[in-house]
Amino acid sequence: MGERADEWYRNWFDDDYLELYRHRDSAEAREFLDHVRARFDTFGRDGAADLACGAGRHAWVMAAAFGWPVVGVDLSMTLLEHAARTDPAELALNRARTPRFVCGDLRNLPLRSSAFRFAVNLFTSYGYFRAERDNERALREMARVLAPRGVLILDTMNARRAVETLIPEDRRQTGEWDVHQRRAYHSAARRIEKTITLRRADRPERRVTESVRIYTPAELDALLARADLETIDRWGDYHTSPFSERNSPRMITIAERVR
Ligand SMILES: C[S@@+](CC[C@H](N)C(=O)[O-])C[C@H]1O[C@@H](n2cnc3c(N)ncnc32)[C@H](O)[C@@H]1O
């Protein structure tokens, strides 16, 4: 049976994805998380969840460098295997703790209710589902695993800037790959779609379309509120600069579980 195009996220996050995004590395994760730790160390120490952790670059920093008890959850077995095989010494991290990694879906997290005081969902890992009820369900799940007054950091694109600065097409060479990307904003569905065509001499051509729902700050606040999460702050980039809808590359929302 063929893969459903609207479930693109099931197969894309594999070795090719890692190769293409290898510049999004542990150093970037460390820089961001050092800022996060300055404010949320006491929360993380009581237990942190990295939801859609991928190859575990944030989970490893939080566990090995900060000593937080960390569980990473992701749907991709390939990326989880990379995560589990990580050698912290190669990333210049201590070995304070080792994160645990679990395979699971954001809509049905394999984690106990109220088990964490801190959770993250980082680097555009939210808004993949075609049906809005599924995106809402994922938020409710993130809230469920948080203890009351626990904190969630949700890192999405800044919708307005993403649309205004969209580059319709580009081409680059990454290692052996010729990478051709086309991007479009579909205003009716409120989604940004990026079709990536990968070509290299020794492989068949591969094409994948990433499709992500984007949200204005007000829309996201309303969604969060329906999941018993209240926005308490917003950053605009990984240096934790204040958010500006006009200029910020990211919309990093900090929300607290209110009940
Ligand atoms: C853009 S990557 C980000 C990974 C990681 N947070 C990072 O910063 O490197 C998105 C991740 O979301 C995961 N993912 C996609 N859909 C998921 C789902 N329904 N449940 C759990 N994880 C999912 C993918 O497997 C992938 O690892």
Image (tube, rainbow, N blue to C red):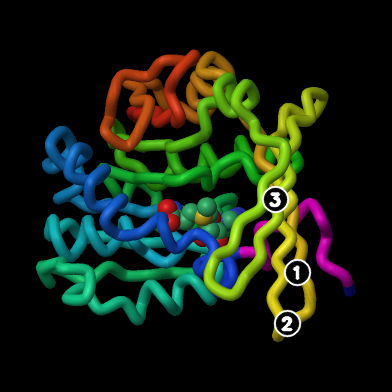
Q: What amino acid type is highlighted by mark number 3? A: Gln
Q: Nearer the viewer, residue 256 or 4?
A: 4
Q: What amino acid type is highlighted by mark number 1? A: Arg
Q: Secondary structure at mark 1?
A: strand
Q: Position of residue 152 (x, y in %)?
A: 36, 37
3D distance between C-alphas at marks 1 and 2: 8 Å
Q: Nearer the viewer, residue 154 or 90?
A: 90
3D distance between C-alphas at marks 1 and 3: 12 Å
* Residue carrying label 1: 206
How many other residues sit within 10 Å of disc 1, few (<14), some (14-19) or many (≥20)? few
| Label 3 vs 2, first from the N-terminus | 3
Q: Position of residue 96 (x, y in %)?
A: 10, 67
What residue is rendered at 50% in x and 35% in y?
Answer: 156
* Residue carrying label 2: 203
| Label 1 vs 3, first from the N-terminus | 3
Residue 75 makes an appearance in the image: no
Region of the chain picked out in magenta, as a range: 2-12
Residue 4: in magenta span: yes
Mark 1 near mark 2, Cβ–Cβ under 8 Å? yes
Q: Is mark 3 within 8 Å of ligand 1?
A: no
Residue 181's tag is 3
